[in-house]
Image: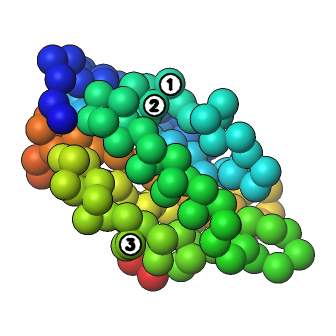
Amino acid sequence: MATDAPSFPVEHKVNTGWGNKHLPPGVLFEKLEGWTQRDVRANTPPEVQDLMDRKGVISLYLEFTSAVQAAPRVRLVGTLKLDAIAAVLATYAPRFDAAGLVVFLCKKRQYVHGGWVTHKWLEYVDREVDATYMPKEIFTG
């Protein structure tokens, strides 16, 4: 369901945790850190919620995020496993695609203060706005 004004119709940047990332129009970013005991609706970035509402898939988004939260986690620390998130995303991807959205699971490793940190996030792409965008940091398994 297309509407008149896409979210972020201009290039914008987001603070990723390792610096700023420039995103083209029609691409939104959502960090996966902090998804442990999260209230999905209360913590969904407003621009992501707006995009899902515009596309008529907010219930699909909430179902997807609940499935991600229920996915297996790293023992002891409880963080989300990228392989598990990728498996969940693979089952939901066709439904997002039918709405003109592509969801990418991304990661970036960074050495910080004597140890490695893995940043995890999702990028939502409105294919009506950008039909070819692919992030450089796609998680491949």
Asked if residue 88 shows in the view, the reply is yes
Identified at 60% across, 56% down, the residue is 66
Query: SS for tag 1?
Result: helix
Q: Which residue is mark 3?
A: 91
In the rendered image, the quadrant that contains the C terminus is bottom left
The residue lying at 37 percent from left, 64 percent from top is 92
- Pinpoint residue 73: horizontal percent, then vertical percent: 72, 74
Indicate the secondary structure of the residue bearing disc 2: helix
Position of 85 relative to 125 (above/below)? below
Name the disc covering residue 49, or none.
Answer: 2
Where disc 3 sits, the SS reads: helix
In which quadrant of the rendered view does residue 90 lie? bottom left
Q: Which amino acid, by three-letter code, is at mark 2?
A: Gln
Q: Amino acid at mark 1?
A: Pro
Return the mark for residue 18.
Answer: none
Distance from Cα at disc 3 to Cα at disc 2: 21 Å
| Distance Cα–Cα, label 2 vs label 1 | 5 Å
Residue annotated with mark 1: 46
Q: Position of residue 97 (x, y in %)?
A: 22, 56
Report whether 96 appears left or right of 60. Answer: left
Asked if the residues shown at circle 2 and circle 1 are in contact, with their CB atoms under 8 angstroms apart, the answer is yes
Q: How is the image coloured?
A: rainbow
* Residue 102 at x, y percent in the picture: 27, 54
Q: Is residue 37 above or below residue 105?
A: above
**Res 110 seen here:** no
Q: Could you classify mark 3 by the number of other residues whose Cα lies within 10 Å: few (under 14), some (14-19), or many (20 or more)?
A: few
